[in-house]
């Protein structure tokens, strides 16, 4: 009836998500998103050159 969950070790990322302020999380995720968009744009440009 009850699901017993196995406890797992915390990671630095999970600690960050749990313990950091909303401002710090926003800064972090904004940076990640900007970097991801840059990588995706580079892939798109590269694919245009290959075609």
Image (tube, helix red, strand yellow):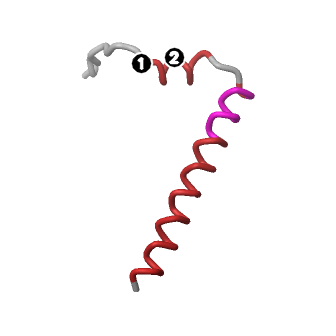
- Above or below 20: residue 29: below
Q: In which quarter of the image is residue 16?
A: top right
Image-based side of 31 in relation to 4, left or right? right
Which of these two is toward me, 12 or 43? 43
* Label disc, if present, on residue 1 of the rendered structure: none
Instruction: Categorize mark 1 by other alpha carbons within 10 Å: few (<14), some (14-19), many (20+).
Output: few
From the viewer's side, name the closer residue of 26 and 42.
Answer: 42
The residue at the far front in this view is 49
Q: The C terminus is located in which quarter?
A: bottom left
Binning the other alpha carbons within 10 Å of mark 2 as few (below 14), some (14 to 19) or many (20 upward) gives few
The secondary structure that dominates the magenta segment is: helix
Residue 5 at x, y percent in the picture: 29, 18
Determine if the magenta segment contains residue 27. yes
Q: Which residue is drawn at 65% across and 30% down?
A: 25
Residue at 25% x, 22% y: name it.
1
Identify whether 4 is placed above or below 36.
above
User: Which residue is disc 2 drawn over?
Assistant: 15
Report the span colored magenta.
23-29
Q: Residue at x 48, y 24 (%)?
A: 13
Using the image, determine if residue 7 lies above or below residue 34.
above
Kindly state the secondary structure of the residue where label 2 is placed.
helix
Question: What number is the disc on residue 11?
Answer: 1
Q: Cα distance, mark 1 to mark 2?
A: 6 Å
């Amino acid at each position: 009836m009850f699901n017993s969950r196995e406890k797992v070790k915390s990671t630095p990322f999970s600690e960050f998500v749990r313990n950091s302020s909303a401002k710090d999380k926003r800064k972090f995720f904004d940076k990640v998103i900007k970097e991801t968009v840059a990588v995706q744009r580079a892939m798109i440009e590269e694919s245009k050159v290959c075609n």
